Amino acid sequence: MPLKATSVRLDDETLSRIGQMADAMDRPRAWLMAEAIKQYVEREEWFIREVEKGVKAADEGRLLDHEDVKAKWEAKRAAQMD
């Protein structure tokens, strides 16, 4: 569903960089900007959902001990170095 066009103000350097990327991708500059905004929104929505899940878990008392988490990550890192 097409949406109403809107205006975004960008500095000249950023706009130039976007233009260079769009040219390299053989895409219109507007497409690249719309895609970047779409990906940003999806990433931020994911982050907000994950924070909300973490807050809910904490409110319910479902927490992990810092030392347990630290030991898990240290073991994982050691296994990757082998």
Image (cartoon, rainbow, N blue to C red):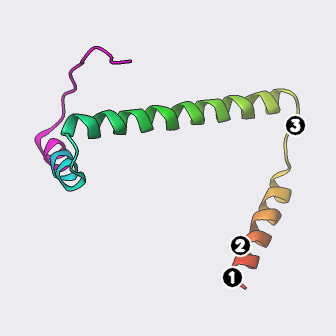
Left or right of 81? Residue 44 is left
Give percent across and percent down for residue 12. 11, 41
Instruction: Answer with the quarter of the image where residue 46 lies.
Output: top right
Residue assigned mark 1: 81
Labels 1 and 2 touching (C-beta < 8 A): yes
Residue assigned mark 3: 62
Segment tinted magenta in the rendering: 1-17
Q: Is residue 76 above or below residue 3?
A: below
The residue depicted at 73 percent of the width and 35 percent of the height is 54
Task: Say which amino acid is labelled 2.
Answer: Arg
Which element carries disc 1, helix, strand or loop? Answer: helix
Task: Say which amino acid is labelled 3.
Answer: Arg
Other-residue count near label 3 (Cα within 10 Å), few / some / many at <14 / 14–19 / ≥20: few
On residue 66, which mark appears? none
Which element carries disc 3, helix, strand or loop? Answer: loop
Q: Is residue 21 above or below residue 50?
A: below
Give percent across and percent down for residue 24. 20, 56
Give percent across and percent down for residue 3. 32, 16
Give percent across and percent down for residue 45. 55, 30
Q: Of 44 and 70, which appears nearest the observer?
A: 44
Which element carries disc 2, helix, strand or loop? Answer: helix
The residue depicted at 87 percent of the width and 37 percent of the height is 62
Specify the quadrant that holds the N terminus: top left
Q: Is residue 20 above or below residue 60?
A: below
Task: Say which amino acid is labelled 1.
Answer: Met
The residue depicted at 19 percent of the width and 40 percent of the height is 28
Residue assigned mark 2: 77
Q: Main secondary structure of the magenta part?
A: loop
